[in-house]
Amino acid sequence: MPRSNRPNRPGSPRPKWGAPPEIDLERARAGLPLRESAPDGDWSVRRITERNAAKTYTCPGCNASILPGIAHLVVWREDSLFGPESALADRRHWHVRCWQTRSFRY
């Protein structure tokens, strides 16, 4: 049967692949981690937007709560001794300002 270039009629069956899923542009823009080098190692840093912040976390920089709806950072080591899976499991949620002003204690 030849293909038709006419649009489907309102009562006709939908194509087998259906409608494409909606893309969350805000998540796509903020989802890629950045790599940061500091005196305490190499870090992957991912921004979490207000819209995607859904849980309460404790910031390791100030020990205060990061409430839902507050933009923050998720940070994990790039150069973990036990490998990337362990580093990802040890990720922490930081306030943006706490991460920027953290001290490097030795």
Image (cartoon, helix red, strand yellow):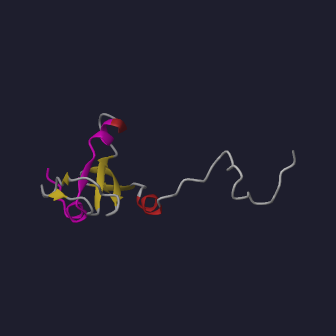
Picture quarter containing residue 66?
A: bottom left
Please state the horizontal and vertical placement of residue 4, each as a whole percent of the image.
Answer: 83, 55
Residue, x 18% and y 60% (percent of image)?
102
Give how far across and how far down residue 43 sits, in percent: 32, 51
Residue at image location 29% in from the left, 39% down from the top: 89
What residue is drawn where x is 21% and y is 53%?
A: 56
Q: Is residue 103 above or below residue 15?
A: below
Q: Viewer-proximal residue, 31 or 76? A: 31
Please check the rendered image and state whether residue 72 is part of the magenta-colored stretch, yes or no: no
Q: Give whichever of 65, 12 is nearer the camera.
A: 12
Give the number of marks: 0
Q: Residue 93 versus residue 86: which sits nearer the camera?
A: 93
Residue 46's spot in the image, x, y percent?
35, 56
Foreground residue among 93 and 49: 49
Segment tinted magenta in the rendering = 86-106
Is 28 on the left or on the right of 55, as rendered?
A: right
- Quadrant for residue 47, please give it: bottom left
Image height of 100 relative to 105, above or below = below
